[in-house]
Image (cartoon, rainbow, N blue to C red):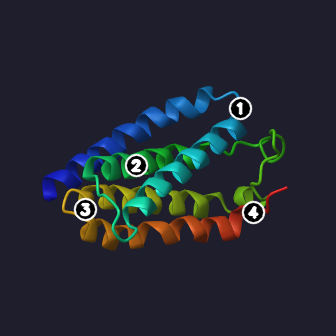
């Protein structure tokens, strides 16, 4: 189990370094933010489907979905440069509070990334291990959305 956590940490660190360079080259941060959120939503959908009573369990798919979330959240907080408060089609739902509390957004994204990586490791141990670990992942999403995401247009 320790090796899997270590590997997850190394992957997250490498992703973080790559993300710094990536964030400097993004020409449309709103579109990238939206893409990340759509990707996370699809990943959560995969996990939620597996957690339904009687559903088939696929440890590899669960691990991949959670690894996607973990990687996405390493990049996500770098996608709020000045000037990206408005715009997009449809318009961004990011609230001004993000730019006023960017350190909190960064901390929340890091926690979600860590929790998702931990859940990805737990997925190999079966659906009940995934269920317990995912219980730590999903509140991260709602907590951030309540503070920093505006209503749909």
- Report how far apart the C-alphas of labels 3 and 1 lie in the structure: 35 Å
- Report how far apart the C-alphas of labels 1 and 4 lie in the structure: 20 Å
**Could you tell me which residue is drawn at 40 percent across and 73 percent down?**
135
Q: Specify whether 128 is left or right of 74.
A: left
- Report how far apart the C-alphas of labels 2 and 1 lie in the structure: 25 Å
Q: Earlier in the sequence, mark 4 or mark 2?
A: 2
* CB under 8 Å between discs 1 and 4: no
Does residue 135 lie above or below 48 as drawn? Answer: below
Q: Position of residue 90 (x, y in %)?
A: 81, 43
Q: Which residue is mark 4?
A: 97
Q: Earlier in the sequence, mark 3 or mark 1?
A: 1
Query: In the image shown, does 80 or 58 lie closer to the viewer?
Result: 58
SS for tag 2? helix
Q: Which mark is residue 122?
A: 3
Label 2 CA crowd tier, 10 Å (few <14, some 14–19, many 20+): many
- Residue 105: quarter of image: bottom right
Query: In the image shown, does 18 or 69 lie closer to the viewer?
Result: 69
Of labels 1 and 4, the one closer to you: 1
- Report how far apart the C-alphas of labels 3 and 4 lie in the structure: 34 Å
Q: Earlier in the sequence, mark 2 or mark 1?
A: 1
Of labels 2 and 1, the one closer to you: 2
Q: Position of residue 10 (x, y in %)?
A: 27, 44
SS for tag 4? helix
- Residue 95: quarter of image: bottom right
Q: Earlier in the sequence, mark 2 or mark 3?
A: 2
Q: Earlier in the sequence, mark 1 or mark 4?
A: 1
User: The N terminus appears in which quarter of the rendering?
Assistant: bottom left
């Amino acid at each position: 189990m320790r090796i899997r956590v270590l590997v997850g940490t190394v992957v997250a660190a490498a992703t973080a370094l790559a993300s710094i360079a990536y964030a400097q080259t993004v020409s449309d941060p709103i579109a990238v933010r939206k893409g990340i959120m759509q990707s996370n939503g699809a990943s959560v959908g995969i996990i939620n489907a597996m957690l339904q009573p009687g559903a088939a369990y696929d440890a590899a798919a669960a691990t991949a979905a959670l690894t996607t979330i973990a990687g996405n959240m390493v990049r996500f907080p770098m996608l709020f440069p000045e000037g990206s408060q408005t715009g997009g089609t449809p318009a961004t739902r990011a609230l001004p509070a993000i730019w006023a509390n960017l350190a909190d957004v960064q901390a929340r994204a890091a926690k979600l990334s860590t929790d998702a990586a931990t859940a990805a490791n737990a997925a190999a141990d079966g659906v009940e291990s995934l269920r317990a670990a995912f219980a730590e992942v999903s509140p991260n999403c709602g907590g951030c959305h309540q503070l920093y995401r505006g209503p749909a247009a």
